[in-house]
Amino acid sequence: MPYLREVILKRSEVPSFEEYPFNIPAIRALESLRFPSPVTVIVGENGSGKSTLLEAIAVLLGFNPEGGTRNFSFSTRASHSSLFEYLRPVRSPRRCRDGFFLRAESYFNVATNIEELDREPANGPPIINSYGGASLHEQSHGESFLALMLERFGGTGLYILDEPEAALSPTRQLAVLRRMRELVALNSQFLIATHSPILMGYPGSTIYQLDAGGFSEVAYTDTEHYAVTKSFLDAPERLLGELFSDE
């Protein structure tokens, strides 16, 4: 049973559906969003509201808007929306013991904060030890993210990932799928916003597509990401010929 079962938009309290972020079509149409499976994937075009929604859910659950665990409290630039104030979570009786909010665009800030905290006097071991021991800034973005997945994520957790594929090669994305499988077996739940047809192919995941009509649950092979990628890989010359036909 997932830790977070559903989020409900308190529509009667929304000040105006003509102002951001409530004027985003998918948010304007939102009543509630259910998470029936261990992995939920949210897809949609740029600007469809994927990251806005995922960020609001993370903040609602107590995570830092810029990412990290619930213990991170740094702020580089307050840019998150007020959407979280109008969401109500529906939790299961089970409680998770671990959690992390990964934002690809601000993971650098998380890594910097870890180094800053480790420079301060402390009674316990350095925080970086939980991330594999090596400075996240001294690794590539992809390597540091894999270190996060392999070393920091320990299971029995709720992991919220916003476009994690940003720094990952296709091979590394497959490695992430394998690690997700291991963590799901350890009673973990994932909420992921992604453009990656590899990550959204996780077996048994619930996929929600955001568009001008709101939210709809779709099958993996019915996503635009799958269709476009398959079309290109099946016949790249044909697709490129059509794309460049006006030259």
Image: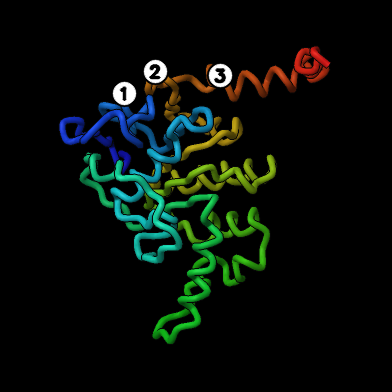
Marks 2 and 1: in contact by CB < 8 Å? yes
The three-letter amino acid code for the residue at tag 3 is: Thr
Is 100 displayed left or right of 34 in the figure? Answer: right
The three-letter amino acid code for the residue at tag 2 is: Gly
Q: CA distance from mark 3 to mark 1?
A: 24 Å
What is the residue that sits farthest to the left in this orientation? 12
Q: Secondary structure at mark 2?
A: loop
Q: Quadrant of residue 121?
A: bottom left
Q: Residues within 10 Å of mark 3 (few under 14, many from 20)?
A: few
Name the residue rendered at 60%, 65% in the picture.
136
Q: The N terminus lies in which quarter of the figure?
A: top left
Q: Residue 213 got which mark?
A: 2
Q: Closer to the N terminus: mark 3 or mark 1?
A: 1
Name the residue rendered at 48%, 52% in the picture.
102
| Residue position marked by numbered label 3 in the rendering | 221
Which one is in front, 217 or 130?
217
Q: Residue 29 got which mark?
A: 1
The three-letter amino acid code for the residue at tag 1 is: Ala
